[in-house]
Image (cartoon, rainbow, N blue to C red):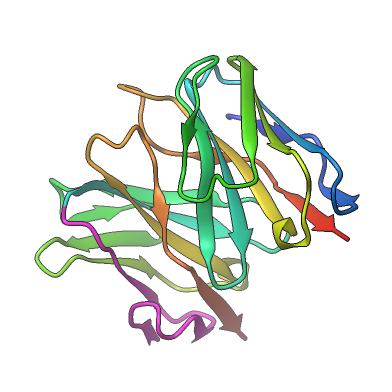
Amino acid sequence: DVKVTQSSRYLVKRTGEKVFLECVQDMDHENMFWYRQDPGLGLRLIYFSYDVKMKEKGDIPEGYSVSREKKERFSLILESASTNQTSMYLCASSPGTGGGEKLFFGSGTQLSVL
Amino acid sequence: GENVGLHLPTLSVQEGDNSIINCAYSNSASDYFIWYKQESGKGPQFIIDIRSNMDKRQGQRVTVLLNKTVKHLSLQIAATQPGDSAVYFCAEKVSDSWGKLQFGAGTQVVVTP
């Protein structure tokens, strides 16, 4: 089975801190995604990457950046955390072109910004 | 029980009954649809998917129906069990959109004994 691992299950940070959320997948998937999940709003796409060093903005990229230096790892960066970034963050991967669109999700990181 | 669209975010179902979760999708250019189940404290898990060239697909205890005419997707769960209690999300992928999925807000299913 595909495994998508997010480095932290819970994280508490202070306003203004730089925050790194790490995600690793073990199935050589081309595509990786970061979503945030808020009650009543479903999952909203922040950024995605379809190849190493490639990134594309999703629907809500403001206040976030990403890094994909290796195929298996996709990092989400909050340059200066704010309270409105308190949320559940979900990382996902998919095989990519010709391999299917089904997303495989990690368990999520619940981030609280105080 | 039946939930129509996203106006009833909670669906209460008696154990053993069939559940129907409905989803209205937005884009007529969407060519792939998928249902996820998310239990408390976990990431979403794949249930079943369907492409736009099909109108029905069956899995183990689950059936997905697609009506492209009215842009409607439904998930049927047979003989609902307590372990089916979760939030269910539908998602659509627009053709040629790099595998990006657009998710609905979700439906909370509560199975009562």
Indicate the position of residue B103 as horizontal and vertical percent values: 43, 57
Establish if B62 lies above or below B23: above
From this viewpoint, which residue is outermost toward the left?
B69
Is residue B66 shown in magenta?
A: no
Residue A28 against residue B82 in the figure, above or below: above
> Which image quarter holds the C terminus of chain B?
bottom right
Q: Residue at x 19, y 65 (%)?
A: B71
Looking at this view, is A34 or B112 the one in front?
A34
Q: Is B15 part of what is drawn in magenta?
A: yes
Whether residue B4 is visible here, answered yes or no, is yes
Residue at 34% across, 78% down: B5
Residue B89 lies, in percent from the top left, at 46, 62
Does the rendering let one see residue B60? Answer: no
Where is residue B92 shown, x and y percent of the image? 32, 52
Please state which of residues A82 and A102 is positioned toward the viewer in this rendering.
A82
Please indicate whether residue B57 sits to the left or right of residue A63 in the image: left
Q: What residue is drawn where x is 28% and y is 64%?
A: B25
Image coordinates of residue B31 in percent, x first then y, are: 21, 45
Residue at x-position 49% and y-position 19%: A54
Total numbered labels placed on residues in the image: 0
Q: Looking at this view, is A82 or B50 the one in front?
A: A82
Instruction: Note whether B35 is above or below B32 in the view shown.
Output: below
Q: Is B110 above or below relative to B51?
A: below
Q: Which residues are magenta?
A: B1-28
